[in-house]
Amino acid sequence: ETGVTQTPRHLVMGMTNKKSLKCEQHLGHNAMYWYKQSAKKPLELMFVYNFKEQTENNSVPSRFSPECPNSSHLFLHLHTLQPEDSALYLCASSQDGASPPSGDTQYFGPGTRLTVL
Amino acid sequence: LAKTTQPISMDSYEGQEVNITCSHNNIATNDYITWYQQFPSQGPRFIIQGYKTKVTNEVASLFIPADRKSSTLSLPRVSLSDTAVYYCLVGFYNQGGKLIFGQGTELSVKP
């Protein structure tokens, strides 16, 4: 166990549905991340939150909406998704998202396998 | 343009040493190099991190040449349980701190 949990582990939704992914970290970290991992592709960073403030948004479509109510919880709200959004969505946390970002070890959750029909 | 490049796949046998190299030509002075391991249906797990020269921990070594444009993850005496995908991560601090994962190297260890 890494100390980062994600729910649900699997999600199937239609293109008109609205759903949310939840991530919780029990490590006392201050930074949290959302990644997308499509089949046979590298992890793509979507959003970064540092001390509850969004510090990075990598040109993610507005149908993905993150929310970070506190340093321990991170949500990804989904609406009107497309079939190409089907992927494994990974949440991670690190002690401090301050620069340099590559020096901060990230702890990943198990991911949510999302299928959009 | 920030980019990391790794071999797509590698094969090995139990007991052998495996070396996986990652190229990161545009690495900045402030950047660290981090390697992660990922098993199916799990999130990546931290293996090792380095800045320059050589770093060793209980599971791996990381070799970084003086120009830091590449790095090599070394797994000594691999076992079947080391079959996984290995990713290198560089932050490319001088390009806005973009966290760029390599495409991953799928290591298959055979008996």
Image: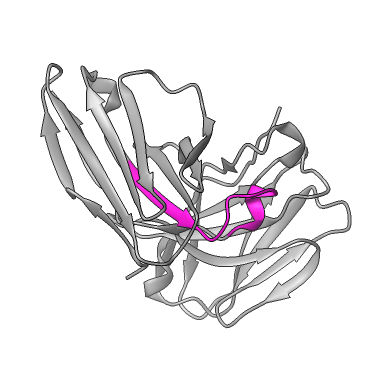
**Figure check: A13 above or below B100:** above
The residue positioned 43% from the left and 77% from the top of the image is B79
Q: Position of residue B43 (x, y in %)?
A: 36, 55
Instruction: State left or right for residue B77 relative to residue B5.
Output: left
Q: Position of residue B35 (x, y in %)?
A: 58, 59
Q: Which residues are magenta?
A: A89-104
User: In the image shown, does B12 or B46 lie closer to the viewer?
Assistant: B46
The residue positioned 35% from the left and 67% from the top of the image is A3
Residue sitting at the far right: B66
Q: Position of residue B72 (x, y in %)?
A: 69, 60
The residue positioned 77% from the left and 71% from the top of the image is B54
**Quadrant assignment for the N terminus of chain B:** top right
User: Based on the displayed image, in which of its 4 quarters is residue A96 positioned?
Assistant: bottom right
The residue positioned 37% from the left and 67% from the top of the image is A2
**Figure check: A103 above or below A101:** below
Residue A72 falls within the magenta-colored stretch:
no
Instruction: State left or right for residue B106 relative to residue B29.
Output: left
User: Based on the displayed image, in which of its 4 quarters is residue B3 positioned?
Assistant: top right
Instruction: State left or right for residue B83 relative to residue B64.
Output: left
**Is residue A34 in view?**
yes
**Is residue B85 in view?**
no
Instruction: State left or right for residue B106 relative to residue B93.
Output: left
**Figure check: B6 above or below B72:** above
User: In the image shown, does A56 or B9 lie closer to the viewer?
Assistant: A56
**Quadrant assignment for the C terminus of chain B:** bottom left
The scheme the figure's colours follow is one colour
